[in-house]
Image (spheres, rainbow, N blue to C red):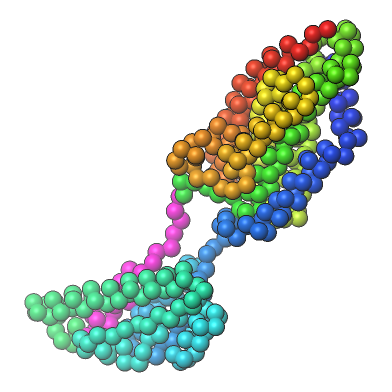
Amino acid sequence: MRHAWTIAKNDLALRARDRSIFIIGLAAPLALAFIFNLVFGAGISDVGETITFDVGVANLDGGPIGEAFAGVLDSIASGGLLNVTVFDSADAARTAADEGDVGASFILPAGLSDSILGGADATIEVVGNIDAPTTTQVASSIADQFGLGVRTANLSVATAMATGVLSPQDAIAAAGETGTAPAAIEIGTVEAATRQIDSATYFVAGLSIFFLFFIAGMAVTSMLEERREGTLMRLLAAPINRKSITFGKSIASVLIGLVSMTVLVVTSTLIMGAEWGAPIGVALLVAGAVLAVVALMTFAGAFAKTAEQAGNLQSIVAVTMGMLGGTFFPITQEGFLGKLSLMTPNAWFMRGLGELAGGGISAALPAFFVLVGIAAVAGTIGLYITGKMLKP
């Protein structure tokens, strides 16, 4: 093992003098992640952010129905879903919606309560901004649900009066208590089947493991280069166990990968505001991802005869894994493509980060164990095949 560490330290010294390792391992993934987040980040919902819809209301009624509707809006706003702006006139509410100051406005006309309590039809007007269709749909749903509650209350009152349960005086009071019905929208926490990390973290994580493939491939390509240059023959002639050579090369790739990923995690957190989660969980997933990628690239490169062939094979594997694993865009876990993506360490690394963000360290452990399993299987086969090229 002492010889393996000596070979690893020698490889690390050689790679440190190669500026390309800093570009591939640090500069390129960080720069591309920043660009991807800038261009595509809006298409991925950020985790932990509350969705708030800006609405306005012009309550010209002044009666019990208007008060009940205002109470519903206050209840929803207290849950963080709505940001309500009150206007003094219908024109002001319409103008605010037209100019985009709010996404939609509610207009309760004067005499609304009198019309409803008198048995006549009445309308709550919803004015939406053309550029805020979601807010308009939410506002329309709230108005529709409230109207349904009012109709239900009126029907109940009419039935009670017809059967003699309520007197006309009590019926008016009961109709005015429409707002005491359950809220039109209930705000609460729902456990999602698929957890998702924020856009900045997503792109940094995806691109960092993508470029990690090119760093990890150096374990095999360096041996092939040394065989071509003759230095590998001198190593084999020395009193060194052949396994120490392969282990030493692999250790160097693992250490470079760990340093690269660690620097990317810290830098992206400070510069881009990425939120990776609990440090222990992140450390486990990073270690598992590095081991899995190094093992896969050792396995892929073991079938090559030259360093050029190894580089080409490893590039094909890296791009294929990146596309299937969701490096450049999210892939749903449902369907054939979702199942196929779980064959890649990329997908398990991203999935582990999502579980870590939503459920803590224990939730990320299955992804860590899968990554270690990939490393064990691919690494064992890859090191066995690679060992055959170590012939004096």
Q: How many numbered discs, if any?
A: 0
Q: Is residue 124 above or below residue 182?
A: below
Give residue 283's quadrant in the image: top right
Nearer to the camera, 171 or 262: 262
Residue 320: x and y, percent?
62, 36
Decide: is 263 above or below 113: above
* Residue found 42% across the figure and 74% down from its top: 139
335 lies left or right of 65: right
Answer whether residue 28 is magenta in the image: no
- In the foreground, 54 or 245: 245
Q: Nearer the viewer, residue 27 or 336?
A: 336
Extent of the magenta region: 172-191
Instruction: Answer yes or no: is residue 53 visible.
Output: yes
Q: Is residue 352 visible?
A: no
- Which image quarter holds the N terminus? top right
Which secondary structure class fits the magenta region best?
loop
Q: Is residue 178 on the magenta stretch?
A: yes
